[in-house]
Image: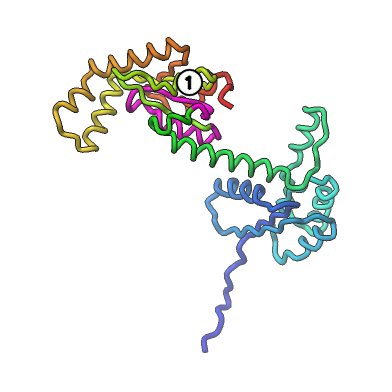
Amino acid sequence: MGSKSSKESPLRQQIVILSDSTGDTAEGFVRAVLAQFQSSDVDIKRIPNIESERALRKSLESITQRALIVYTFASPELRKTAWSLTRELSYTGLDLLYPAVEIFSEFLGSSPSQQAGALHSVLARDYFRRIEAIEFTVKHDDGMRLNEIHLADIILVGVSRSSKTPTSIYLAHKGYRVANVPLVLGIPEPKELLTAHEKKVPVACLTIHESDLERIRRTRFINLGAKTKQSEDHYLAIDQICAELKAAQQLARKYGWPIIDVTDRAIEETASEILLLINGKAR
């Protein structure tokens, strides 16, 4: 039988998360911080639903190796106990809510609710709101389900390949339900779009420099394998593109919709300007 190596591998570093709720929020924070470092040799252990000082002490005493203790408690008493016990047991401790709670309390002139799991509940609601927004946006892309676009937080309009879809998805990840509607030269704007406008749903028109649009469309045209000369003349001709852009801008001006030029702009820049121009009315 072979003997064990006299040189044992060192213990992996450990981060222990203590929480009065699930600890999901704290773990997300820890992982976000760890992503800034090269080392991946870190174990994350979560101990949730700690509701008493006795349970807190028991949890800390169950740790069998050197560890960083990250804790998040709504109760000031538990926070103070965690601070003193980590020092007593020679651990490095990090309170995720302090001093943020105190700073906010002073600024707002009120005391925190001290409700266990409150932060997790807020983030959970935000998560599900973003998921719902993404689902809505995907279902209402490129003029689909026009009868429902009045339920959107924001509607984007513009000619083909003017960055409506990627901008919509970016806004959806921010929690906004977005519908986007293509504007086609010679075809009247959908009546559902005007109905949504009358119901005060914010509408923004995306535009782009004609040469950039021609280049984007040509690349798209080639990638799709379209070969007919008629299709190419209709879709790629600069005169046609200029006419489309002009008609879209005229429609936007008619109804007072902001016109946003996406030429050489990152999606996040376009999205930020949209939110600024609609003056926060997208919610």
Q: Residue at x 49, y 40 (%)?
A: 135
Residue at the (59%, 27%) spot, across then down: 283
In the picture shown, does residue 204 fall above or below 95? above
Membership of 152 in magenta stretch:
yes
User: Magenta span has 139?
Assistant: no
Q: State the count of labels.
A: 1
Q: Identify the colour scheme used.
A: rainbow
> Which one is nearer the viewer's eye here, 226 or 91?
226
Q: Quadrant of residue 109?
A: top right
Dot 1 crowding, Cα within 10 Å, few <14, some 14–19, many 20+: some
Give the amino acid at mark 1.
Answer: Thr
* Residue 5 vertical position relative to residue 144 in the rendered view, above or below: below
Residue at horizontal 71 percent and vertical 44 percent from the top:
96
Q: Position of residue 115 (x, y in %)?
A: 78, 44
Above or below for 14 versus 207: below
Quadrant in the picture for residue 102:
top right
Q: Residue furthest left?
A: 229
Q: Position of residue 273 (x, y in %)?
A: 50, 21
Q: Is residue 108 depicted above or below 261 in this figure?
A: below
Camera-side residue: 130 or 28?
A: 130
**Which residue is at 43% across, 19% downward?**
260
Mark 1 lies on a secondary structure that is: helix
Q: Is residue 109 left or right of residue 97?
A: right
Q: Is residue 71 left or right of residue 88?
A: left
Q: Position of residue 39 (x, y in %)?
A: 54, 54
How far across and down, in percent of the image, does residue 203 sit?
A: 48, 21
Magenta range is 150-176
The residue where tag 1 is placed is: 195
